[in-house]
Image (cartoon, helix red, strand yellow):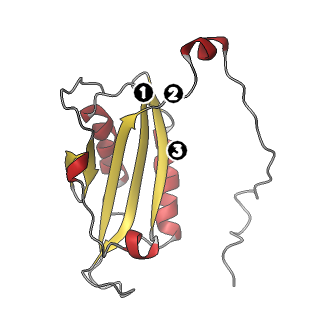
Amino acid sequence: MLNAPSQSEPIVYVSGEFVPQSQARISVLDHAVLYGDGIFETACARNGRIFKLDAHLDRGFRSMAAIALTPPVDRETMRALIVEAVRRNGLADAYIKWSVTRGSNGRPLMDPTGWVANRIILGQPDSNRAAAARTAQGRQLKTVRGRRPPEREPDPARRG
């Protein structure tokens, strides 16, 4: 997964291509901008391995299905693009954010005719907020108890 690129600027994937971050653009008519319409996932890589990438892909594709957003690529292509974004930035430890937006059809309307979904994939150096000495001693973890309904129960957001 690793290559040590010589660029000083992160490479991102947007609108179907890898570009330097400063050149990344999406349309102001993209439904993510106009309506917050899309999904996102956040993952991390440690020592050159993306943590639970399959679980993140599963959740991302479930999220697209939940909002009736047709995936712009299949699961394996999305996986390859995420891995490539991390590789192109030469990151062993990375913060990874990927989004799929409804995209744009060139009009600021909710009319779905001609929408072209958009993908945005960022692989950035992980910002370890703890000092190395503290990390070596271990970190404290706090958990919050929360009840999730079992998967066999109907989605409470659906009515009817």
Label 3, label 1: how many angstroms apart (C-alpha)?
19 Å
Q: Earlier in the sequence, mark 3 or mark 1?
A: 3
Residue name at image x 30 percent, y 49 percent: 77
Q: Amino acid at mark 2?
A: Asn
Q: Residues within 10 Å of mark 2 (few under 14, many from 20)?
A: few
The picture places residue 103, in percent across and down from the top left corner, at 32, 71
Label 1, label 2: how many angstroms apart (C-alpha)?
9 Å
> Which residue in the structure is indicated by mark 3?
55
The label nearer to you, 3 versus 2, is 2
Q: Residues within 10 Å of mark 1 (few under 14, many from 20)?
A: many
SS at circle 3:
helix
Q: Badges 1 and 2: C-beta atoms under 8 Å apart? A: yes
Quadrant (top left, top right, bottom left, bottom right) of the C terminus: bottom right
The label nearer to you, 3 versus 1, is 1
Q: Residues within 10 Å of mark 3 (few under 14, many from 20)?
A: few
SS at circle 2:
loop
Would you place residue 19 above or below residue 48 in this image? below
Q: Earlier in the sequence, mark 3 or mark 2?
A: 3
Q: Is residue 144 left or right of residue 118?
A: right
Quadrant (top left, top right, bottom left, bottom right) of the N terminus: top left
Q: Amino acid at mark 3?
A: Ala
Q: What's the mark number on residue 128?
A: 2
Residue name at image x 27 percent, y 46 percent: 12
Q: What's the mark number on residue 93?
A: 1
Residue in the foreground of this view, choosing between 131 and 26? 131
Residue 70 visible in image: no
